[in-house]
Amino acid sequence: MLRRTMTGGRAAALAVSIVSVLATAGAPAAADGSGQVMVRLETPSTFVMYNADEGAAASNDDFVVPVAVVPGGGPARDVKVVVDASGLAGVAVASKGGYGNCTGDGPVFTCVYGDLQNGDGEANAPFTLHGVDGVRPGDSGTVTYTVTADNAAPVTGVTRMTVGGPTLHAPGPEKSVSGLEPGRAAALTPRFANNSRFPARQGVALRVDVSEGMTLTPRHSNCFYAGPAPTSAWCAFPTRAAPGAAYRTSAPLLYSVTPPGKPTGDVTYTWSADPRKPADHTVRGAGAPLALVPTPGEGFGDGYGGVGVTTTVQADYRPVTATVRGRVGDTVKVRLGVRNLGPGEPSDSESLGRFEVVPPEGTTVTSVPYSFEGDGGEWACDRPAGPGGAFVCAIGYNPFYEARDGRGTTALDFHIRIDRRVPGARGTIRAYNPYDRTPGNDVAAIPLEASPALPYRTFRQPGTWFAIGAGALAAVVLAVGYRRRRAAS
């Protein structure tokens, strides 16, 4: 199990490093059964720092240095790594930054990993890499490591750090696709432009990803897919994209909605001049290879290309309702909310929708407490602006989303006080999301069944029982005195 010192998005960078080719010089791959403690350096043998056309503007703090204890030999104590980046002179500058428990201003850094348990690991990012002007694709340098521990032999390693390039630009979001039915294929033709002054000497690579509820069709022999029903594809092209040139794929890539699907989705793609295949893309397409052909060079931006998709899949919401039942003066809990009958589910928090509650006449909502851990507030829903308005509960609010019961239901306990009996009073609850195409079941009643208050409730105002008690006591004293006088006479 890998223990991390970084937070947030650094986990993704760590995963990339670990699945890269490992540089484990000086460390055996497994314990030899002798019980000796051994540590293993899990840095990649090669790493692309930045693209040549970025020059001094480039900055990268995603390079991590993972260290693990080889299983079978026991824990390692007081593990440290000295990272020497002096071999990057002329191609990059390693300065203090990154994240984790590291010291030093560069080019040498010392990272403290502490005690590591048998089989566990930890990672630090000792520096931030900055580009320099004047480099060309393929320029490189080295970073070296020395790992020490109180009870294990030292381990050394090296990473060849390379300048990549050029940066390849995609056209950005394209016209969206609407009404895509589950099982029906749609097509996307990726494009890119090389707006730098460097050719792509090693060829180019295309990465395509689809969101949950969609699938790519694995059909090109120069494309590798992540599994038999892939949501990701990686395609390699030998084309040395020239400076100022633009290209598109010779045929479109196909994607489809996987039943039951989701109401929305998206297809995104990026281009790279680094033709290294991701380790998890293992299924090769069986059809004709995909090629690149020239295309007009107008309209290219930065970053991703892709398309947003709206499907025919609906998310049919139905209100979850209950009766407000009790005596006048009672405050009761009434569980209200919404259930998704499917077949799909909105893909993002913004489209999860809401439910709106108007309580029955003769009642007052005193609170709608948060029912999720860590929130102690009284109002999980927005209160109405005026009398007779609706309480609005937005399901897209993240804690609300996490509070769902796993069966598509989100519900809360409304605390409702019964103020008076109103025969036939009924409140309403309305469910809404933009992909509900069955409006007939979106509204339900919240009936009121109020019984008369118990007699003692008339005396529950503050101070009433004190006054009543004193009067009763005086009456008793007078009665006893009267009886005694009569007996004496």
Image: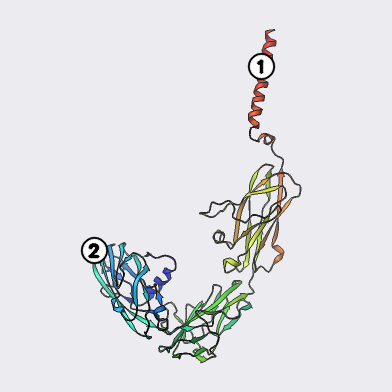
Indicate left or right for 346 with 99 as reference.
right
Circle 1 residue: 480
Q: Nearer the viewer, residue 9 or 452?
A: 9
The residue carrying pointer 1 sits among few (fewer than 14), some (14 to 19) or many (20 or more) residues within 10 Å by Cα, namely few
Location of residue 53 in the rendering, given as x and y in whole percent from the top left corner: 42, 83
Among the 4 quarters of the image, the one containing residue 466: top right
Q: Amino acid at mark 1?
A: Val
The residue carrying pointer 2 sits among few (fewer than 14), some (14 to 19) or many (20 or more) residues within 10 Å by Cα, namely some
> Any mark on residue 419, and which?
none
Q: Determine whether the residue tagged by mark 2 lies in a helix, strand or loop.
A: loop
Q: Amino acid at mark 2?
A: Asn
Q: CA distance from mark 1 to mark 2?
A: 93 Å
Q: Nearer the viewer, residue 470 or 281?
A: 470
Q: How many numbered marks have been drawn onto this rendered protein structure?
A: 2
- Indicate the quadrant containing the N terminus: top left, top right, bottom left or bottom right: bottom left
Location of residue 264 in the rendering, given as x and y in whole percent from the top left corner: 60, 73
Q: Residue at x 67, y 18 (%)?
A: 478
In primary-sequence order, the first of circles 1 and 2 is: 2
Circle 2 residue: 151
Q: Residue at x 25, y 67 (%)?
A: 148
Instruction: Identify whether 455 is placed above or below 292.
Output: above
Visible in this render: residue 277? Answer: yes
Location of residue 63 in the rendering, given as x and y in whole percent from the top left corner: 37, 73
Q: Determine whether the residue tagged by mark 1 lies in a helix, strand or loop.
A: helix
Location of residue 2 in the rendering, given as x and y in whole percent from the top left corner: 37, 66
